[in-house]
Amino acid sequence: MSLNKHRRALVAGLGLSFIAAFAHAQAVPKTVRLIVAYPSGGVSDVVARALADKLAAQLGVTFIVENKAGASGTIGMDAVAKAAPDGATLGFSSISPLVLNPHLVKSPFDPMKDIAPVVSVMYSPVLLLATPATGTRDFKSLIDDARARPGAIRWATSGQASLGHIVLEQVRAVAKVDITHIPYKGGGQQLTDAVGGQFEILSTNAGPSVATQIQTGKLRPLAVAAPTRLESLPKVPTLAELGYAAANQTSLFGVFAPAGMSPILIEKYNVEINKALASPDLRERLKQSDNVPTGGRAEDFAAEIASEFASNGQIIRAAAIKPE
């Protein structure tokens, strides 16, 4: 073989090796870790596990769900931000750790630079529920009681600077009442304590476990933060109807990746998650728990997050909301 032919053969071989290595780098790893930014047992955990099962079947890979709760989702999302962008780690969370928490507490990562939005998964209404610790039957009675007994009403949320906390602060500001905030590290334990009457009021995302407790009468819905009344609770007014428009906020959940992940891999995950969300069984599972499936393009999800970051900053500054 001549020297030139040898060089051409070597270059061709190197080219094929590069293409093979590039293709391998864009392939979904055989094992993918899905970090859920909240404890097990809550609606986010249930949905994340159902989605992981769908993706495992569609992609033919193993999904391992790992709960990393705390700091209203910030701990879990920090783990995503610091993971290698090789496709082996994804996160499932509400957008609060990106658009809400950083306005109130120092974030260990840059929410606009260190996380790559992959796809939105669902909107989750926030329910305001009375527990066995109180005889409150409607929202007006709650406010009347809070005015009559400043500080006596205990309102539990899924954590400091969580959306439920913002709802509480907005109610406090508009109604001019003193209500005690009880922050938890997610939804599982606070639901158990709510049923046990450890506090009077609970704000939490809709989900199967919550729906069960409402159906059995152990928790009584007073209001819902949602664009319209829920089909499952047609007699329960929205907070906007009650005059608390700023408190009438839903949680948007989605899948995220570490910044720097290949756009090809992000698009691959986006397509597969949209496919999973289009499946009738998963959509029905979400709707039965009053959660609304979303989906869509990664760039649209990123734009919505940027918009929410700006608007939440304005709301928090206007209301002078501070972490406790």
Image: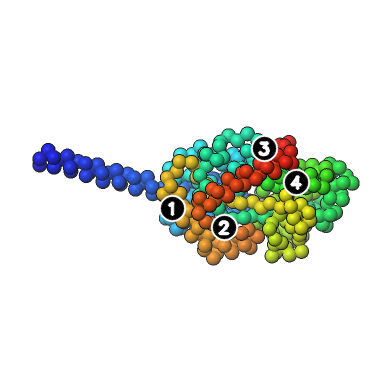
Secondary structure, mark 2, is: loop
Image x and y of residue 81, in percent: 52, 39
Q: Is label 3 in contact with label 1 (beta carbons under 8 Å)?
A: no
Tell me which label, 3 or 1, sits earlier in the chain.
3
Q: CA distance from mark 4 to mark 3?
A: 15 Å
Q: Residue at x 55, y 61 (%)?
A: 282
How many other residues sit within 10 Å of disc 4, few (<14), some (14-19) or many (≥20)?
Answer: many
- The residue sitting at the right extreme is 148
Q: CA distance from mark 3 to mark 1?
A: 34 Å
Tell me which label, 2 or 3, sits earlier in the chain.
3
State the residue in front, 190 or 236: 236
The residue under label 3 is 104
The label nearer to you, 1 versus 4, is 4
Quarter of image, res 123? bottom right
Q: Amino acid at mark 1?
A: Lys
The residue under label 2 is 294
State the residue in front, 40 or 142: 142
Tell me which label, 4 or 3, sits earlier in the chain.
3
Q: CA distance from mark 1 to mark 2?
A: 17 Å
**Is residue 323 placed above or below 129 in the rendered structure?**
above
Tell me which label, 1 or 4, sits earlier in the chain.
4
Q: Residue at x 54, y 48 (%)?
A: 302
The residue under label 4 is 170
Q: Amino acid at mark 4?
A: Gln
